[in-house]
Amino acid sequence: KQWYQRRVAITAGRDSYNTNGRANAHFEDLNRNFPDQFHQSEEKVREPETIAVMKWLTDHRFVLSANLHGGSLVANYPFDDTVSGVSNGVYSQCPDDTFFKHVS
């Protein structure tokens, strides 16, 4: 019998939650503080909140996750970025693209 676990992180950025913005107390946008497939520089300073979430994700293996927040309706898929960081109108398909579209 296989068990499925659910984990909920209410918010990783307490400072941004209190200010209704995306920056923490160091004025860093936590959404842009994580490494991505193109920009994984070890020289970039990671904020404490980012390090804590990265450790949590390493400690708890995920198959699927969801993020709920106010604002526009958005579905993010793996590899949904570009080398320049600017949308160029080209869709970056991931290996499980059909599945991710189905569950979104």
Image: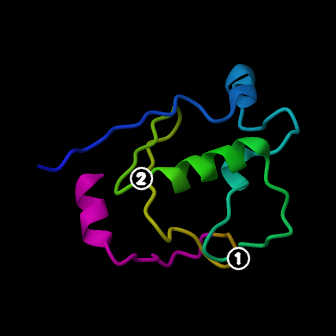
Residue holding disc 2: 75
Which badge, 1 or 2, is on the more N-terminal residue? Answer: 2
Q: Position of residue 53 (x, y in %)?
A: 61, 46
Specify whether residue 93 is painted magenta. Answer: yes
In this rendering, would 12 be left or right of 91?
A: right
Q: Could you say where residue 11 lies in the image, as x and y percent from the top left?
A: 58, 31
* Region of the chain picked out in magenta, as a range: 87-104
Q: Secondary structure at mark 1?
A: loop
Magenta span: helix, strand or loop, mainly?
loop
Residue nearest the viewer, comparing 52 with 20: 52
Mark 1: give few (<14), some (14-19) or many (20+) Cα within 10 Å.
few
Which residue in the protein does label 1 denote?
Answer: 84
For disc 2, the neighbor class at 10 Å (few under 14, some 14 to 19, many from 20) is: few
Left or right for 50, reference 72: right
The x, y position of residue 66, in whole percent, is 40, 45
Tell me how far mark 1 sits from mark 2, CA to CA: 20 Å
Residue sitting nearer the eye, 42 or 90: 42
Residue 53 as seen in the image, left or right of residue 41: left
Please say if 51 is above or below 80.
Answer: above
